[in-house]
Amino acid sequence: MAAVAVGAIVGRVPNAHDGSYLNGLATLATVLGAHSGLTRLRLRTGAARMLEHRPRLLVAEGRVQEDELRRCGLTRDDLDGLLRQQGIEELRLVRHLIFEPRGQVSIIRETAAASRMSAGAE
């Protein structure tokens, strides 16, 4: 996240018409200082619990865990977008989808044999 902010600041300052290089430098120092402070806080156990969430299981055995999805502040459309990014078109192809502490998702796909068995049971 800090890298995106730094890139935006560095990209805009040289093109600014008013030549406010000092403002850009102050903003850049603030962003980098805040990032450094938060990174150090995350190393402390108590602060880490406040700053990061634990991994959350959003899909279990092909079924959306609506309560967990809501706790993460995600919608069903968000979940569908995450699945599309991974090339998954059908929810039944997902054994588990875990929302990781840093915002990434881990997807454990349903095995082909288990998928065929569940399709035959329906």
Image: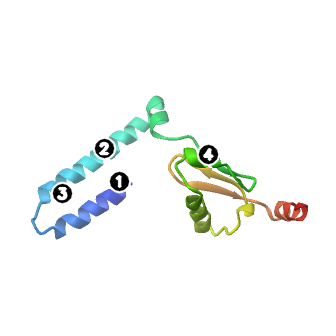
Helix, strand or loop for disc 2: helix
Label drawn at residue 34: 2
Compared to residue 93, the image places residue 48 above or below, namely above
Q: Badge 4 is on which residue?
A: 68
Count of numbered circles on the image: 4
Helix, strand or loop for disc 1: helix
Q: Residues within 10 Å of mark 2 (few under 14, many from 20)?
A: few
Label drawn at residue 2: 1
> Closer to the observer: label 4 or label 3?
4
Residue 64, horizontal then vertical, whole percent:
68, 53
Label drawn at residue 113: none
Query: Residue placed at 57% from the left, 64% from the top?
Result: 81
Query: Residue placed at 65% from the left, 57% from the top?
Result: 107
Quadrant position of residue 104: bottom right
> Closer to the observer: label 4 or label 1?
4
CB contact under 8 Å: marks 1 and 2: yes
- Three-letter code for the amino acid on which mark 2 is drawn: Ala
Query: Residue placed at 29% from the left, 49% from the top?
Result: 32
Q: Residues within 10 Å of mark 3 (few under 14, many from 20)?
A: some
Instruction: Please give left or right for residue 106 compared with residue 23 in the image.
Output: right
- Three-letter code for the amino acid on which mark 4 is drawn: Glu
Marked residue nearer the N-terminal end (1 or 3)? 1
Quadrant of the frame with the C terminus: bottom right
